[in-house]
Amino acid sequence: MDRVLASGMVAQGPEVAAFEQEFSAALAGGREVVAVNSGTSGQHLGMLALGLQPGDEVIVPSFTFAATANTVAVCGATPVFVDVDPETFTIDPAAIEAAITERTVGIQPVHLYGHPAPMDRILSIAQEHGLWVFEDAAQAHGATWQGAQVGTFGQGGMFSLYPTKNMTSGEGGMVSCASPELSRQVRLLRNQGMEKQYANEVAGFNNRMTDIHAAIGRVQLGRLPGWNATRQKNAAFFDANLQGVVTPVVRDEASHVYHQYTIRIEGASAEERDAFATALREEHRVGCGVYYPTPVHRLATFRSEADLPVTEVLAREVLSLPVHPSLSEGDRERIVAAVNDVAKAGA
Ligand SMILES: *Cc1c(COP(=O)(O)O)cnc(C)c1O
């Protein structure tokens, strides 16, 4: 922070450039990345840069945070909602294929909770139909699929740096770009359409990251691998000790970074799941959360008639437990005892 203030450059400057270089180096695959002021901005600019236009359709899961679909909608395009795999909570490739129309231009898979979507199958569908893929990796910094990091599969991808994510810059986002043309376009859109000052080439935004945020992000980036390893250790403890609830599945191809550790109260109604959460919070002082109680396609924003049975079940049954790297051994034991107790009482 002192370094940033002493430099006299508080807006996008040398810290942002260094953060982009370091983030890119950590993202094996040699991708260029562009820093922006939020994950949502990154998704928005990334898809605009890929040419998204009014009238286009983009296939997205409904079981996600609303930004995934909002960023399609604010481009004037239509998010087409499809169902997810009940075990990994990620977009179902068969459902993608069934949703393709002559208006479809792209697919936006979400690596939800830190578990990668099945990128090999998604890429082969995209190639067959001439579609782009833009990855929503907001929750999955460092996760891998078949050994390659998420955010390196699609034409583009976005990482969020919001404070609750596996790493943060205060607020911020990174766009990973497969081509120099795409990164140039995202850079233009980020800064009023200018590469050279006052020589605006396209109509753009002010979605720049500040050097203050970048300085925070650089410190956090160095700590990410250790934090992810601790999240994985916490998850392994839960996997081994929780009883009476469905624990998260990890595919053989995947390394899961547990942005959330999400259990299912199988067969529960939304009220029963909420009562489970209330018991954990009030009787056992265990914080927990529901991500997300209303599928995006049913929000007032979209009111889609899509029939997504797996999504509906998951929205009723999921509950996320604390898995963050600062849990103590005692915390983990207390969480396990609490969940097992509430599950037993409800069985
Ligand atoms: C957090 C998040 C976003 C948006 O990122 P922000 O940095 O908050 O704008 C988008 N998609 C998913 C799945 C997220 O979890």
Image (tube, grey):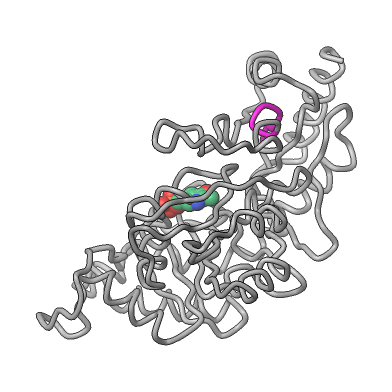
The residue at 33%/59% (across/down) is 54
Residue stretch in magenta:
314-321
Residue at left offset 81%, top offset 65%: 253
Q: Is residue 175 left or right of residue 148?
A: left
Q: Residue 118 appears in which quarter of the rendering? A: bottom right
Quadrant of the image occupied by residue 27: bottom right
- Furthest-left residue in view? 198
Question: For this rendering, which residue is in front, 123 or 344?
Answer: 123
Q: Position of residue 9 (x, y in %)?
A: 21, 72
User: Would you say residue 318 sits in the magenta stretch?
Assistant: yes
Q: Residue at x 77, y 72 (%)?
A: 146
Report the residue at 73% width, 57% height from top: 256
Which one is in front, 326 or 138?
138
Q: Quadrant of the N terminus?
A: bottom left
Q: Which is nearer the eye, 130 or 83?
A: 130
Report if residue 15 is visible in the image: no
Residue 190 percent location from the top left of the image: 28, 69
Q: Position of residue 221 (x, y in %)?
A: 53, 67
Q: In the rendered image of this protein, does residue 275 appear above or below residue 188?
A: above
Q: Is residue 260 left or right of residue 205?
A: right
Question: Is residue 105 part of the magenta span, yes or no?
Answer: no
Please state, as top left, top right, bottom left or bottom right, where the C terminus lies in the image: top right
Q: In terms of image quadrants, where is residue 169?
A: bottom left
- The answer to whether any part of residue 331 appears in the image is yes
Residue 181 shown left or right of residue 224 in the figure? left
Q: Tell me: residue 164, above or below residue 332.
A: below
In this rendering, position of residue 128 left or right of residue 75:
right
